[in-house]
Amino acid sequence: MTSSVSDSSHSVSPLNIVIATRESRLAMWQAEHVQALLQARGHRVSLLGMTTQGDQILDRSLSKVGGKGLFVKELEQALQEGRADMAVHSLKDVPMDLPEGFELACVMEREDPRDAWVSSEYATLADLPPGAVVGTSSLRRTVLLRALRPDLKIEPLRGNLDTRLRKLDEGQYAGIVLAAAGLKRLNMSQRIRHIFDETDMLPAAGQGALGIEICTGRQDLREALAPLADPATWLRVAAERAVSRAMGGSCSMPLAAHATLQAGALTLQAAWGDPEGEPRLVTAEATLNQPDHAAAEQLGTQIAERLRHAGAH
């Protein structure tokens, strides 16, 4: 993995590229966004829409059926079989360790990484009456919500963005928590009542960033994707994902990890909570000056170690 980016668009021969994508509205937006950027550089790009296991299993939480890797397996199979050349993912849905034969070839500039409060009736989480029902599919959001409001009832919420909003509008929940990035990308910012500050709701590793996966060894695709990469985002998510990897690698862990980069200083914060136990968070934070990718990942490993020492598991 490298953070060096050069605009090699002039020297890269035009390619015929097929992008594998889930068929949800947000996934299609992401794939079409990458398609447009590559086409602007002279490549011929088509989309292969697919339904994944994660899209089909909606009656159980992800942590009980195999984690967020369920959203990428079918796409990886299409890459392996040569039906597609690359897959565009929300990086928070990508397992921390990719299967052998695959690599993350590009991390793009990050959209807003924060969580959004969406409700028809209540302007903020603080406005909810005790016992109100809040929907989320995320163990991370569950533990952070419990730490903020232990008096609320947190209920599972599965489905794509439109499905989740429909369930809210039907009155199944007093409010729901979603990634701000998805709502903004689909021009649905008007649904956001409040954006949580990172101090209240620390984002997930990679939240708001798009990652592009290819089969290992496709140097032609690496070169084509190089102009789309954002080194600052890649550095930040390298540190965040290293925390998750060191804590066991599961995307379904009740773990938050978020890095900021200011004036060359990388600050990494992480939080862990027990979904079944006390509504108490274990937190850790550290800053590193002028890090490269290896140092950013090492910082993530150190933060994970601090979390474990403080009681996370």
Image (tube, helix red, strand yellow):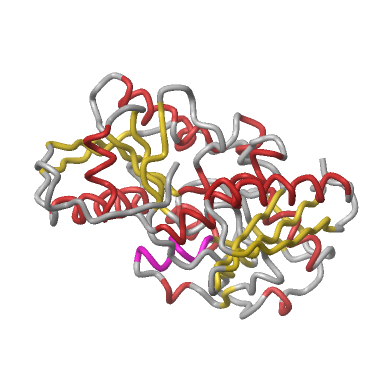
Residue 168: quarter of image: bottom right
Question: With 197 as the anchor, is 41 left or right in this view?
Answer: left
**Residue 163, image x, y percentages:** 46, 52
Front in this rendered view, residue 86 or 78 = 86
Residue segment shown in magenta:
179-186
Image quadrant where one finds the N terminus: top left
| Residue farthest along the front direction in this orientation | 290
What secondary structure is the stretch in magenta mostly built from?
A: helix
Residue at image point 67% right, 66% down: 201
Classify residue 90 as left or right of residue 152.
left
**Residue visible at 59% across and 68% down in the picture:** 265
Which picture quadrant has residue 151? bottom right
Q: How many marks?
A: 0
Q: Residue at x 65, y 78 (%)?
A: 124
Above or below, comparing residue 79 to residue 305 in the picture = above
Rendered location of residue 72, percent (x, y): 44, 34
Front one among 171 and 134:
134
State the image coordinates of residue 115 (x, y, percent, origin top left): 58, 65
Residue 268 in the image: above or below residue 190: above
Name the quarter where the C terminus is drawn.
top right
Q: Nearer the viewer, residue 7 or 144?
A: 7
Q: Does residue 35 show up magenta in the picture?
A: no
Asked whether residue 182 is drawn in magenta, I would say yes
**Left or right: 33 with respect to 150?**
left
